[in-house]
């Protein structure tokens, strides 16, 4: 594990050599990397690796993919925190510098500590600082020295567990974290490490219980509160997450981790101004942390600054190139900019990094569906549904069911595009049964019922349920969906339109306009237009429909004029106010006027996550 790796980059191609003896030289020969010692030379191509053992010529060896082996490119979350005022004199100056974000000054202070004062605690905190800057091999060496000086140093096992979690050594990570807790039962750091190990094994409930014990044993530990906020978010407990994040920020306002978590907590509440302030402060405190870059990018996109938001996510991907979720979000940002090649590249990279994560498959399916590739989209979405439960590492069971329902509704939409209406309805019903609170599933059924005869009441019912359950979104409401008994020709023009039901992850302020029209024999004219938009925490949809036809015989004419206006204000993630106005002026074939006007106000207290 402590074996040094040597990397070289030639014309954009990465090479990796693992060296087990100082007698091996790494050089460039004829445009390739050459591993050379007294016993021979080995030329390596892109992505190839070699091992050079003492007394033997370099030999090719498949260790891991180069991206996995470059441990310095991985991000290691912090678990240790210490007040410089309470630290030993040998560490006080270094910890003070680290608290200011002066990493160079911190290491200079550590180097000035005499050898006789470099005890186990010194080695432990030096290893933690090394880990913060990605020098994982040196951190491992420091951990080994700390354990040699004090085999019962529980925090050393906690730090080792975090490294093992990031490097996907789950069994050993859990064992080391449990040993850390056994040796230091009142240490918040040991419990934080255990929570990471438990989360890596899909035990979110256990991780939450562990963190509750951590904040109970050390109520002034900012990292413990920040970590608890993360877990609350995984359960959709957004208010609890914000309170925990605010507590962490109040305890340690100059710690990058607390500001990052606080920024994400504000972002889930759509408080983008406060979120950006927290993220920018976190970046100033630690410019090597990718998470605040990701959060800042999402906040900017939410405020309709897509180019700058995408740029921040690109920086996050550069700082943590092995993070498949960041790659998926970057692909989504490129998709919003209609950069198909870049989108495909990022989704492919995300799949390579984590082939068991459904996120990239889901977003790729959305892209392929919108670019008229429904069969490929179908395959990707079926794969996303198959892998859905793998997200249990950061999503609760309830949220996983909600994710599955959304994917089933999306699958139904693709079946509908392919003309498989019965299969589409089956997926819609399955989605509603899986999660009755999923608004997109109800909306999909409303759209599907609009083309079926004698389903008017069911269509209006499903649309109403979708409206009551939805968060603010830019999905338009077709006027024809809100009225039953329209007597329209289901397969003609506006009556057969399918509006986009996907609520993009990058849901940003803006306006959309969708129109359609129809001209036919017997003086048949139809037109429909809908304007929808989002501004901060308010969304609206205003649309109108006109339909007229003389009919196929005397007194068979029909005319309908429908107007629908809908506005929603989100007071909190759990509570929203909705108001809707409907107007209809219709004439049947006997030319008797029909007038209807409905004003509806709905105040609902709904959990967005079900």
Image: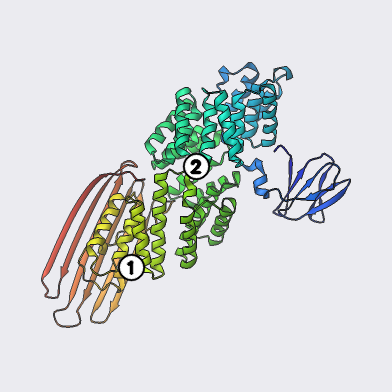
Q: Secondary structure at mark 1?
A: loop
Visible residue check, residue 499? no
Between residues 180 and 293, which one lies in front from this camera angle?
180
> From mark 2 to mark 1, how far is it between C-alphas?
42 Å
Question: In this view of the protein, which residue sits in the foreground, 386 or 255?
Answer: 386
Q: Is residue 487 left or right of residue 348?
A: left
The residue at the far right in this view is 38
Residue 387 locus on image (x, y percent): 49, 53
> Where does the N terminus fall, quadrant-wise?
top right
Q: Quadrant of residue 114?
A: top right
Residue 266: percent from left, percent from top: 42, 38
- The numbered dot on residue 202 is 2
Q: Report if the CB atoms under discs 2 and 1 are less than 8 Å apart.
A: no
Q: Look at the picture and state if 94 lies above or below 237.
A: above
Q: Which residue position holds label 1?
A: 497
Q: Secondary structure at mark 2?
A: loop
Residue 11 drawn above or below residue 234: below
Query: Residue 538 at x, y = what percent?
Result: 32, 48
Which residue is depicted at the point 53% across and 60% down? Answer: 339
Residue at position x 20%, y 82% in the image: 552
């Amino acid at each position: 594990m402590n074996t040094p790796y040597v990397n070289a980059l030639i014309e954009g191609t990465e090479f990796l050599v693992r060296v087990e003896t100082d007698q091996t030289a790494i050089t460039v020969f004829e445009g390739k990397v050459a591993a050379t010692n007294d016993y021979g030379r080995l030329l390596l191509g892109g992505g190839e690796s070699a091992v050079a053992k003492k007394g033997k010529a370099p030999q090719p060896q498949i260790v891991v993919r180069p991206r996995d082996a470059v441990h310095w490119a991985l991000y290691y979350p912090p678990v240790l925190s210490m007040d410089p005022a309470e630290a030993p004199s040998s560490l006080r100056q270094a910890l003070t510098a680290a608290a200011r974000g002066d990493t160079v000054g911190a290491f200079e202070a550590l180097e000035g500590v005499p050898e006789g004062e470099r005890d186990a605690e010194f080695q432990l905190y030096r290893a933690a600082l090394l880990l913060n800057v990605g020098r994982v091999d040196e951190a491992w060496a420091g951990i080994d020295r700390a354990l040699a000086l004090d085999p019962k140093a529980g925090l050393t096992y906690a730090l080792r567990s975090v490294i093992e979690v990031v490097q996907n050594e789950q069994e050993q990570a859990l064992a080391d974290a449990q040993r850390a807790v056994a040796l230091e039962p009142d240490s918040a750091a040991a419990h934080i490490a255990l929570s990471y190990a438990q989360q890596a094994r899909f035990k979110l409930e256990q991780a939450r219980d562990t963190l509750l014990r951590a904040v109970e044993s050390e109520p002034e530990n900012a990292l413990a509160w920040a970590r608890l906020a993360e877990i609350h978010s995984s359960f959709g407990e957004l208010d609890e997450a914000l309170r925990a994040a605010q507590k962490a920020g109040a305890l340690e306002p100059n710690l990058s981790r607390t500001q990052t978590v606080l920024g994400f907590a504000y972002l889930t509440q759509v408080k983008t101004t406060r979120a950006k302030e927290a993220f920018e402060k976190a970046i100033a405190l630690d410019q090597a942390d990718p998470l605040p870059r990701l959060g800042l990018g999402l906040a900017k996109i939410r405020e309709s600054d897509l180019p700058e938001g995408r740029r921040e996510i690109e920086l996050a991907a550069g700082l943590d190139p092995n993070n498949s979720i960041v790659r998926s979000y970057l692909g989504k940002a490129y998709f919003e900019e209609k950069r198909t090649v870049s989108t495909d590249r990022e989704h492919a990279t995300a799949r390579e990094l984590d082939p068991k994560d459904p996120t990239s498959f889901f977003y790729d399916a959305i892209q392929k569906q919108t670019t008229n590739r429904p069969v490929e989209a179908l395959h990707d979405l079926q794969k996303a549904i198959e892998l859905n439960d793998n997200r249990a590492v950061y999503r609760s069971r309830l949220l996983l069911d909600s994710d599955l329902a959304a994917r089933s509704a999306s699958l139904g939409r693709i079946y509908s595009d392919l003309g498989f209406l019965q299969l589409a309805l089956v997926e819609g019903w399955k989605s509603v049964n899986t999660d009755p609170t999923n608004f997109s599933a109800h909306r999909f059924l409303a759209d599907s019922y609009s083309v079926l005869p004698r389903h008017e009441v069911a269509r209006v019912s499903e649309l109403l349920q979708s409206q009551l359950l939805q968060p603010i979104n830019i999905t338009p409401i077709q006027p024809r969906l809100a009225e039953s008994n329209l007597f329209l020709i289901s397969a003609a023009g506006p009556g057969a339109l399918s509006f986009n039901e996907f609520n993009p992850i990058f849901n940003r302020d803006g306006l959309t306009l969708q129109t359609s029209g129809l001209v036919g024999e017997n003086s048949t004219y139809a037109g429909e237009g809908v304007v929808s938009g989002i501004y901060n925490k308010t969304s609206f949809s205003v649309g109108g429909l006109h339909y007229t036809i003389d009919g196929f015989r005397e007194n068979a004419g029909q005319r309908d004029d429908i107007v629908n206006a809908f506005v929603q204000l989100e007071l909190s993630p759990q509570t929203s106010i909705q108001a809707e106005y409907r107007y209809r002026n219709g004439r049947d074939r006997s030319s008797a006027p029909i007038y209807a006007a409905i004003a509806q106000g709905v105040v609902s207290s709904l959990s967005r996550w079900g």
